[in-house]
């Protein structure tokens, strides 16, 4: 029986396979970055597993609920640039990070409810927003070469596999490099013994702390980078596929779910772009009006991935630090390419965008506030000065 001949109410195999591929590509390509973010704010192993569990469940619930309500495939993802931003922070404890996550989530909800706020965010020049994202990602990508020198037997084969598969199917390139790197680390004895791999996953409540430096230095940039680099492209992906995106409900629901998940350590969830594209094509289902059902398979896959959090955390914790640096660097080669292209692509704001990138990448902290915020301030100030 072909997919097109599947009985009514039965999900076609093509829909299930697209959802599973999209979820595994999204998970495998950036899970190392999420774990690096958890390490940067001092999360324990239990808190890190709770982070993975909560963010996966938030994505699953949001995708299923929004797809069912809107009758279109509304695919959610975790904020990859947001995870990079968190991983680049210093001096912020887990409790303060949770407070920043809650602020970012609340601002996303307000953006969905208050249209002038959405228009204000949309007025931030694309080049400046891209410059902030490029500045956040640059230090991680620069760590790839030193990691290759430290672990050449593992990192160089990963890079070769990534480059080779990127020519055939870029969606699988990072996932294959991740699998190869983990396998080589254990085969060569570079990995430490795995502990706690089969612990039962459970949410860990974290009492938030609201410090001004974390709220301004992490919470506000997390909101901005999530809106500019994830939600807006996600809506554009839906429009390109011929759907009218439910902007206000999607922002409100994803922001509310992010706020709840934040109490268990998770950062923000948002509209997906690349993984969403996998779930929107004609090969998923020939009838566009039926493709919304892919959200159920996608959500179920993310629930399964969330339950595997302790195993993933234990495996990644056993890897050498240089190998983790390499995994993160490889995963971010694609995103930084897009960010740099957008940074240089707008002639009217190109210099201001470069200023934004440089200040953000510098890692400078002023008044306890991180570099991403000051990069945005510097870029907007430069742009205003030039226009005057």
Image (spheres, rainbow, N blue to C red):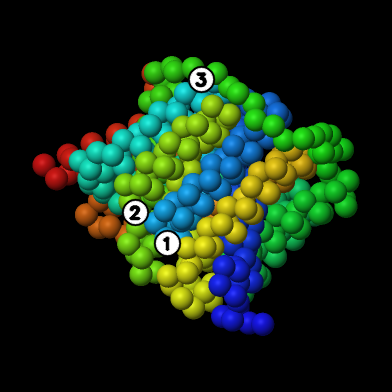
Please identify the residue farthest to the left as the structure is shown: 388
Q: Residue at x 26, y 47 (%)?
A: 122
Label 1: few (<14), some (14–19) or many (≥20) C-alpha neighbours in 10 Å: many
Spot occupied by residue 88 in the image (x, y as percentages of width and height): 52, 35
Q: Quadrant of residue 175?
A: bottom right
Q: Hey, which quadrant is residue 26 in on the image?
A: bottom right
Is residue 307 shown above or below 262?
Answer: below
User: What residue sits right under mark 3 in the picture?
Assistant: 208
Residue 287 appearing in the image: yes
First in sequence: mark 2 vs mark 3: 3
Foreground label between 2 and 3: 2
Q: Mark 2 and 1 residues: CB-CB less than 8 Å, in contact?
A: yes
204 relative to 348, above or below: above
Residue 176 is situated, as x and y percent measured from the top left of the image, at 70, 61
- Would you name the residue on which mark 2 appears? 246
Q: Which mark is residue 72?
A: 1
Residue 331, visible in the rendered structure: no
Q: Residue at x 54, y 27 (%)?
A: 263
The residue tagged with tag 1: helix, strand or loop?
A: loop
Q: Nearer the viewer, residue 30 or 308?
A: 308
Q: CA distance from mark 2 to mark 3?
A: 31 Å
Under circle 2, the secondary element is loop
Contact between marks 2 and 3 (CB within 8 A): the answer is no
The local crowd at label 3, few if under 14, some if 14 to 19, many if 20 or more residues have their Cα within 10 Å, is some
In percent of the image, x 42 and y 62: which residue is there?
A: 72
| Closer to the camera in the image, 114 or 181 | 114
């Amino acid at each position: 029986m072909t997919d097109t001949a599947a009985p009514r109410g039965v999900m076609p195999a093509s829909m299930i396979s697209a959802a599973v591929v999209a979820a595994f590509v999204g998970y495998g390509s950036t899970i190392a970055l999420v774990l690096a973010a958890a390490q940067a704010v001092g999360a324990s192993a239990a808190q890190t597993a709770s982070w993975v569990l909560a963010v996966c469940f938030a994505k699953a619930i949001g995708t299923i609920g929004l797809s069912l309500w809107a009758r279109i495939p509304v695919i959610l993802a975790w904020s990859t640039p947001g995870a990079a931003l968190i991983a680049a922070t210093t001096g912020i404890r887990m409790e303060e990070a949770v407070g920043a996550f809650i602020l970012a989530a609340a601002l996303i909800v307000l953006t969905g409810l208050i249209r002038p706020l959405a228009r204000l965010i949309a007025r931030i020049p694309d080049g400046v927003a891209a410059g902030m994202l490029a500045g956040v990602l640059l230090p991680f990508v620069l760590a790839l070469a030193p990691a290759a020198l430290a672990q050449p037997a593992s990192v160089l084969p990963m890079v070769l596999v990534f480059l080779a598969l990127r020519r055939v199917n870029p969606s699988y390139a990072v996932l294959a490099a991740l699998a190869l790197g983990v396998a080589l680390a254990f085969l060569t004895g570079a990995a430490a013994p795995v502990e706690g791999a089969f612990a039962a996953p459970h949410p860990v409540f974290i009492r938030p702390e609201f410090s001004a430096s974390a709220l301004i230095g992490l919470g506000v940039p997390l909101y901005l980078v999530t809106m500019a680099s994830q939600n807006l492209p996600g809506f554009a992906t839906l429009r390109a596929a011929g759907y009218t995106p439910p902007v206000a409900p999607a922002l409100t629901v994803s922001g509310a779910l992010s706020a709840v998940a934040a109490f268990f350590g998770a950062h923000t969830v948002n509209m997906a772009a690349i993984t969403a594209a996998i779930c929107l094509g004609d090969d998923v289902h020939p009838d566009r009006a039926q493709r919304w059902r892919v959200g159920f398979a996608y959500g179920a896959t993310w629930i399964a991935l969330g339950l595997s959090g302790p195993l993933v955390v234990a495996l990644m914790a056993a890897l050498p630090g240089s190998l983790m640096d390499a995994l993160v660097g490889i995963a971010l080669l694609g995103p930084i390419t897009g960010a740099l292209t957008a940074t240089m692509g707008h002639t009217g704001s190109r210099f201001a965008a470069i200023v934004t990138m440089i200040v953000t990448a510098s890692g400078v902290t002023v008044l306890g506030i991180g570099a991403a915020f000051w990069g945005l301030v510097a870029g907007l100030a430069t742009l205003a000065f030039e226009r005057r």
